[in-house]
Image (cartoon, grey):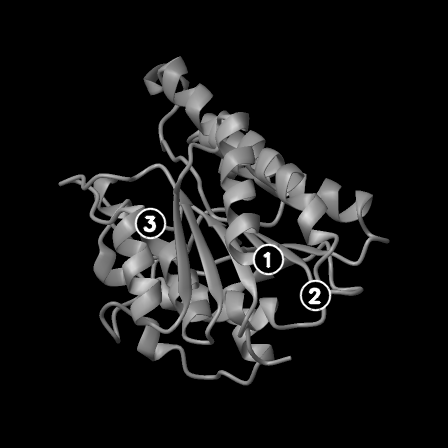
Amino acid sequence: MSTLHGKTLFITGASRGIGLAIALRAARDGANVVIAAKSAVPNPRLPGTIHSAAAEVQAAGGQALAVQCDIREEEQVEAAVAAAVDRFGGIDILVNNASAIWLKGIAETPMKRFDLMQQVNARGTFLVTQKCLPHLLQAANPHVLTLAPPPSLDPKWWAPHTGYTLAKMGMSFVTLGLAAELADRGIAINALWPRTIIATDALNMIPGVDTRGCRTPEIVADAAHAVLVRPASGFTGRFLIDEEVLGEAGVTDFSGYAVEPGRPLLPDLFLD
């Protein structure tokens, strides 16, 4: 399989950034995309809503369903999954993209922010996967792809921002555990992480990051596409890196993904 035509993707946090880029790549194949995110009204600080994302998906050639959904709320996730199945008849692919970030140490991390990260990142990934699972088990080539790094216990990744690292690694460990638990059920449960920092609107809210040294979300979207068209059976429990995935697919020149070609790239967190 080399296309996602006719497949239904449920993507969390898809109103902007990497989630939207993955949605648009699938849409170009003629996929059905469920845009599940909180942003239903425009925010001057963070462009993009579920409605604008759905319009872009349709313009790119896909079918779209915009669903306002806070993945911390079980009832909202259940309703979003039900709406997806009602509209498209099932769910073939889940992309756990939604994530909260706060790159501060313990003294500068309000507990409200700490709780948000744990609830959205690890718990949200677990919850959405749980609610999509019955439908994924009925799909012909089911995938769960989570935007999370390879698990690491290296203190250098924990010391600067323990709260965020705990939340992000939580997504990784959920991937590890569910892949093992469901290894004999035919679902590909994997994680994908970028080699370099990705320029998104959310990144602009983090002081000190020069987006000129970043890549665009399209590199992650193309890597995700290469993963999601693979046969699911036996392909699970992997912690994939965008460059490596694209390299296996025959891509050797990544310069087109750079925000400013020729500028040294900023390596992403959690990778040596």
54 lies left or right of 4: left
* Disc on res. 141: 2
Of callouts 2 and 1, the N-terminal one: 1
Q: Amino acid at mark 2?
A: Asn
Where residue 226 appears, as percent x and y from the top left, is 56, 73
Using a 10 Å C-alpha cutoff, classify the residue at mark 1 as few (fewer than 14 neighbours), some (14 to 19) or many (20 or more). Answer: many
Q: Amino acid at mark 1?
A: Ile
* Observer-nearest of 102 and 226: 226
90 lies left or right of 20: right
Where residue 46 appears, as percent x and y from the top left, is 21, 43
Cα separation, mark 2 vs mark 1, equals 8 Å
| Mark 1 element type | strand
Residue at the front extreme of this rendering? 86
How many circles with numbers are drawn on the protein?
Answer: 3
Q: Amino acid at mark 3?
A: Ser
Residue 105 seen anywhere in this rendered image of the structure: yes
| Depicted 114 relative to depicted 212: above or below | above
* Disc on res. 59: none
